[in-house]
Image: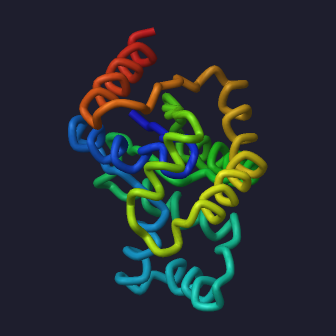
């Protein structure tokens, strides 16, 4: 099963992706984690990404996609994966679909976690991170709406999106996620 967890910053994608990955016995692949792994293993792709990160620049879409594809092409990931934090824009979504097709794979479901903006802002403020001010959070949400939400429309066109309400306890939301994955895999 190949899944993407999608939603605004602070909605709980990472938490829910991790819980579901553990439950299904498949890897949770987040871009931050695979960038760090590629660096630790001194892979050429990781070293290239580091050059951008050291300058404070965004890693280009094609390089990000290459690193993600390398991660889920590993034999240990052959039973499926959960992507979190990728794709972030339409260019990455299209590149991912092309790469998956070349590998004979496809995305089975896009879990779209939703929550009211006020809930997300409160969650992010309560994390206590110094860079999580209300202005910064609102800016991140604006960037998400302008750059990342078109990815949702892209996957909706393939009828792959299952919306899950992300408010409640971690376990309550997790049960909704599990139900959503079952519904989409049984149809």
Residue 154 point in image, percent of width and height = 72, 34
Foreground pick, 90 / 46: 90
Quadrant assignment for the N terminus: top left
Q: Residue at x 53, y 73 (%)?
A: 131
What number of labels is visible?
0
Foreground pick, 154 / 132: 132
Q: Residue at x 75, y 51 (%)?
A: 147
Residue 179 point in image, percent of width and height = 34, 18
Foreground pick, 83 / 42: 83
Q: Residue furthest top?
A: 187
Quadrant assignment for the C terminus: top left
Residue 91 point in image, percent of width and height = 75, 53
Is residue 49 found left or right of 122 in the rendered image? Answer: right
Q: Is residue 16 above or below residue 67?
A: above
Q: Is residue 51 above or below residue 69?
A: below
Foreground pick, 17 / 77: 17
Asked whether residue 95 appears in the rendered view, the answer is: no
Query: Which colour style is shown?
Result: rainbow
Is residue 113 found left or right of 48 in the rendered image? Answer: left
Q: Residue at x 51, y 45 (%)?
A: 120
Asked whether residue 115 appears in the rendered view, the answer is: yes
Residue 114 point in image, percent of width and height = 53, 32
Q: Residue at x 73, y 32 (%)?
A: 153
């Amino acid at each position: 099963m190949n899944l993407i967890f999608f939603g605004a910053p602070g909605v709980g994608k990472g938490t829910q992706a991790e819980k579901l990955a553990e439950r299904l016995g498949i890897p949770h692949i987040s871009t931050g984690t695979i960038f760090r792994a590629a660096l630790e293993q001194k892979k050429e792709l990781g070293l290239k990404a580091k050059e951008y990160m050291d300058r404070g620049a965004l890693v280009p879409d094609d390089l990000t996609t290459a690193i993600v594809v390398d991660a889920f092409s590993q034999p240990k990931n052959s039973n499926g994966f959960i992507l979190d934090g990728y794709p972030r824009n339409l260019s990455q979504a299209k590149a991912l679909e092309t790469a998956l097709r070349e590998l004979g794979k496809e995305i089975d479901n896009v879990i779209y976690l939703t929550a009211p903006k006020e809930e997300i802002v409160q969650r992010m403020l309560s994390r206590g991170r110094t860079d999580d001010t209300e202005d910064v959070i609102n800016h991140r949400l604006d960037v998400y709406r302008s750059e990342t939400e078109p990815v949702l429309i892209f996957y909706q066109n393939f009828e792959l999106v299952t919306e899950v309400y992300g408010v409640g306890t971690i376990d309550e939301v997790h049960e909704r996620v599990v139900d959503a994955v079952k519904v989409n895999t049984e149809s």
